[in-house]
Image (cartoon, rainbow, N blue to C red):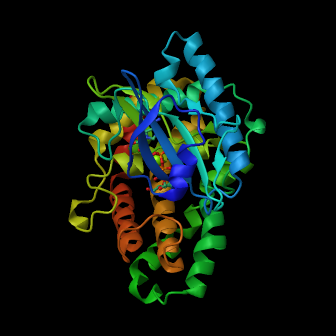
Amino acid sequence: MEELREALSNFRFDGELVSVKEFGSGHINKTYIAKYKNGENEQKYVVQKVNNGVFKNVDELMDNVFAVTSYLRKKVRENGGDENRETLHFIKTLDGGKYYKCADGSFYRAYVFVKDSVSFDFAKNSDMFKSSGIAFGRFQKMLGDFNADSLYETIENFHNTSWRYENEFIPALEMDVKDRAKYCADVINFLVERKDKMGILVDLINEGKIPLRVTHNDTKLNNVMFDEKSLECVCVIDLDTVMPGLALYDFGDAIRFGANTAADDEKDLSKVSLNLEYFKAFAEGFLSECGDTLNQCEKDHLAFSAWLLTVELVMRFLTDYLNGDVYFKTEYSEHNLVRARNQMKLALSMEEHMEEMKDIIKSIR
Ligand code: ADP
Ligand code: GN1
Ligand code: MG
């Protein structure tokens, strides 16, 4: 708490601190909502302790997000939108910095709470999920001209599934530091059996068939803010992984999180499957915004990308379980294994419905 107080007193907030409390369900950073009051005016800010284990170079990370948000502000303004609601607005530190480093070495940053907005871990209906597809598709389209070379790679090989298999999963399995491999033979076998398909998208990049674009790379439903009343999408948040990537990563990751019929840590696997209605709704929203910019090869791999990103998360959660829960926030010791099995069940459901998924995509474009 002391470091949080230290951080709070070093940003250019408007007024006096009224309250501060932990907030949100992200797996990586620690997020707080801080309320300030200046006379009659109350202003809410989001203050985050950046996970420095995950994001090793905070200077580069913050340069990226400042560059992207100022570019998006300009675009939104040009399109006649409300730049204060539709893009993140960062608050500088007292000495003009993009983040504050506490005496104990931890890193904090702050931005304005998007007014009258709310985020969801679960879509209330297919319209809401479609709206998140519009948000991420628009985000993709707006960044179409952004110079990808100017961005740092905040996490290398982030969605390089075959690289993760060889360089993270296999070493974690061989080390088995917590002696946990014996509890997860089913998930290990699932991954080993699918190894050959993990490099398909990276191969298509290398063959020049799919272009690298500036993408979000972490398109969970709770990374979109919705208007409190209308439930229309307002703003895409959590820009830490905006870097060169594939439109397919954004599509696939959104589906694996939002079109699951259960939460991604539901233990009862009979509740876990792909919601085809949601799959269709998201695809409609996403493609209505950025469909025109995708080439045929990208379109042909939309359904596959949902499967691949799901398998990638099976592997990332399992790797973290084997490593002793060092990456994702967990609430109990089996949490990462539960998540891995949940995503495995979802990937199996997608395998069962792959032809329907492809038909749905064909029916839209
Ligand atoms: P993480 O990287 O841990 O997922 P996020 O940046 O996604 O962190 O923030 C966690 C949660 O905090 C979000 O899901 C959202 O509910 C809330 N949040 C983050 N930024 C804002 C903002 N600018 N305005 C309102 N709520 C926000
Ligand atoms: C993390 O930060 P959050 O909760 O939005 C992770 C994603 C995973 C997701 C799984 C930087 O996202 O890649 O898909 O958890 N973010 C990072 O729920 O690793
Ligand atoms: Mg998030």
Viewer-proximal residue, 62 or 195?
Answer: 62
Q: Is residue 187 above or below residue 57?
A: below
Q: Residue at x 51, y 61 (%)?
A: 312
Q: Is residue 69 above or below residue 269?
A: above
Which quarter of the rendering shows the C terminus? top left
Q: Residue at x 50, y 79 (%)?
A: 322
Q: Give the side of residue 144 with respect to residue 279, left or right.
A: right
Give the x, y percent position of residue 49: 54, 52
The quarter of the picture where residue 122 lies is top left
* Residue lying furthest right: 149
Q: Give the side of residue 314 with respect to residue 198, left or right.
A: left
Q: Is residue 135 above or below residue 327?
A: above
Q: Residue at x 41, y 70 (%)?
A: 336
Query: How many marks are shown on the rendered structure?
Result: 0
Q: Residue at x 68, y 54 (%)?
A: 203
Whether residue 218 is visible, yes or no, is no
The quarter of the picture where residue 338 lies is bottom left
Q: Give the side of residue 167 with respect to residue 327, left or right.
A: right
Viewer-proximal residue, 332 or 265?
Answer: 332
Give the x, y percent position of residue 56: 68, 58
Give the x, y percent position of residue 355: 38, 48
Q: Is residue 186 above or below residue 227?
A: below
Viewer-proximal residue, 308 or 354?
Answer: 308
Give the x, y percent position of residue 26: 43, 52
Whether residue 196 is visible, yes or no, is yes
